[in-house]
Amino acid sequence: MSSHDDLLKKVSELREKSILGGGKDKIEQQKQKGKLWVRERIEKLLDPGSFVELEWLRVHRSTYFGLDKLKYYGDGVVTGYGRINDRLVYIYAQDFTVLGGSIGEVHGEKIAKTIERAIQVGVPVIGLYDSGGARIQEGVASLHACGRLFNANVKASGVIPQIAVIMGPCAGAAAYSPALMDFVIIVKGSYMFITGPEVVKAATGVSVSFEELGGANVHGSTSGVAHFVADSEEEAFEIIRKLLSYLPNNSTEEPPFVQTDDPVDRRLEELYEVVPLDPMKPFDVKHVVRSIVDYGEFLEVHRDYAKSAVVGFGRIGGYVVGIVANQPAVNAGVIDIDSSNKIARFVRFCDAFNIPIVTLVDTPGFMPGVDQEHGGIIKHGAKVLHAYAEATVPKITVIMRKAYGGAYIAMGSLSLGSDVNYAWPTAEIAVMGPEGAVRILYRREIEKAADPEALFKEKLKEYRDVFANPYRAAELGYIDEVIDIADTRRKIYSALVLLSTKRAELPPIRKHTNIPL
Ligand code: HXC
C-alpha cells in the first residue's frame, strides 16, 4: 500500500513538469530574448500569493506530426484566477516555451473556459499573449479551439472587461482574440499580424520586417489595434492596474468611486491662458482635461492613434468618467475616419460599463477629402452618431469653441440625447464656419460688389454676430448654460451628482443595434 506521501510525490512531480512547461532550455531562450517567463509574468502582475491555477494537468490529444511523443502538462497556457489590488480577476497566460504558445485543442479550450468562468463570476479577464497562432500539427482541431476562444471573447463582450497584453509574437488566429477584447496593450519588441512577413512576401512581393509589419509602434499609432504601448512588460502590468482602477467588475456594477481631497469647486483659472480667444489658434486640449480631472490624473487611451481626438479615463469628484475631446492642436480637431472609430469605440465601451461620458468639443467638422470619402467617412462618422445616440449612461457635453455642422451633432449634442450641455462664452455653434458660410450664402453679391472684400467682411461680421457664439443655441434650449471656463470642473461635477441616479430607457425588443461598420 502506498502512503499519502507517495501519492503526493506523484502530484508534486507532475506539478513540477507542468510549471516548467517547455523545459529549462526553452525558458532560458525566452529570457535571452529579454522576455519574462510565463510564471514570472503572473507573479509580477497579481497580488503576491493570490494566484490559483486551474487545469494544469491537461495535455493535448493529437498524435500527428510527432505530437504523440510529446507531453506538456498545461498545454502551453497557464490559466486561473487571482487578485490585482485585492480585486478578483481571471487570467490566462500563453507559454511560448511549449510549441511556441500555439493554440491547440486543449490550449484554446482552457482559455475559453477561463473567459466563461470570468463571465459567470462577473469579474474582468486578462489575457497575456505570446503565441505563434493556431497549432499547425493539430489541424482543424486547433482551428476549432481558436473559434471556441473567439466565441468566448464575444460572449464576454460588454459583460466583463477584457484586457489583452501582447508580450511576444501574436500571430494568425492568436491576434483575433485580443482584437475582440476591450483593451490591447502591446509591449515594445512584440508584434501582431494575421499573415507574417514570409506570406506577405510570397503573396505581394513586399519585403517587410516583423517590426515594420506589426510592431508596437505600428499598432499603437497606425492601425489602432493596440490601445496602449508599453516600454516593458512591467509597464504593461502597471497599465493594467491603472486601467482596472477605473473599471467596474462587470456591466451590472458601477465603476469604483474614490473619495478625493481635490476640491470639486476648484476654479480652473489657468484655462484663461490655455484657451486662445481666436478660434483659429490651436491649444492642447489635454491641458483642459488635466485641469478638470481629480489631481490631474488622466489615463489616455489610444494616445498615439488618431490624435485629432483624445479619449481616456479620469475622475471628477471621485466619479469615474470617460472623456472624449477634440484636439485642436492636431488638424484643428477635425474628425476623420480614424478618430471616428476611436471615439465611437470608446463611447460604446463607457456605455457598456456604466461610465459617464464627458465630451469636450472644439472641432471644425468632419474631414474633407477624396481619400476620406472613398474610405467611407460617411459610415465611419456615422459610428460616432450611433454610439452617442445609443449610449444611456450620463452624457455631459461642454462646447469649448468650434462646434460646426455634423460634428456639432456627433459630439454629444442634445439632439443625440446628451443630458447636460454647457458652452463656454467662446463657443461657436453653426452649420459651418463663418468664412465658408459667407462664401456660399453671398457668392453672387460678393462677385458683383464694388468692393468685394468689404462686403465679405461685413457679411462675416453679421454671421459671427448671429451664429459664432453660444447664445442662439442657448435661446433654443440646446445649451443648458453658458458657463465661465474656470467653473467647468464644478459644473461637470454637479451634473454627475445629478445624473448618478439617471434611469435609462432601453427599447423592449431588440437583439442589438446595427452599428455601421
Ligand atoms: C505549431 C509553432 C507555431 C504554430 C511556432 N511554433 N508557431 N508550432 N504551430 N503555429 C513552434 C516552432 O515550430 C518552434 O518549435 C517554436 O514554436 C518556437 O518558434 P520559432 O519559430 O523557433 O520562434 P521565433 O523565431 O521566435 O518565431 C516565432 C514566430 C514563428 C514568428 C511566431 O514561429 C512563426 O512564424 N510561426 C508561425 C506564425 C503563423 O503564421 N501563424 C499562423 C498559424 S495559422 P521548436 O520545437 O523548434 O521549438 C492560424 C490560423 C489562421 O493561426 C488564422 C487566421 C486569422
Image (spheres, rainbow, N blue to C red):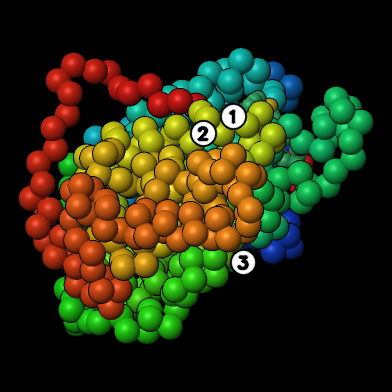
Asked whether disc 3 touches disc 2, contact meaning CB atoms under 8 Å apart, the reply is no
Task: Give the Cα distance between marks 3 and 1.
Answer: 34 Å
- Quarter of the figure with residue 233: bottom right
Query: Measuring 69% from the left and 64% from the top, which residue is drawn there?
Result: 34
Asked whether disc 2 touches disc 1, contact meaning CB atoms under 8 Å apart, the reply is yes
Disc 3 vs disc 2: which is toward the camera?
2
Asked whether disc 3 touches disc 1, contact meaning CB atoms under 8 Å apart, the reply is no
Task: Locate residue 307 relative to residue 203 in the image: left or right.
Answer: left
**Which label was assigned to residue 231?**
3
Q: Position of residue 356 (x, y in %)?
A: 25, 52
Q: Residues within 10 Å of mark 2 (few under 14, many from 20)?
A: many
- Whether residue 183 is visible, yes or no, is no
Is disc 2's CB within 8 Å of ligand 1? no
Please, what is the three-letter code of the amino acid marked with disc 1?
A: Gly
Please, what is the three-letter code of the amino acid marked with disc 2?
A: His
Most distant residue in the front direction:
450
Q: Position of residue 186 (x, y in %)?
A: 58, 54
Query: Measuring 38% from the left and 21% from the top, which residue is drawn there?
Result: 514
Residue under label 1: 376
Dot placed on the residue nearer the N-terminal end, 3 or 1: 3
Q: Secondary structure at mark 1?
A: loop
Residue under label 2: 380
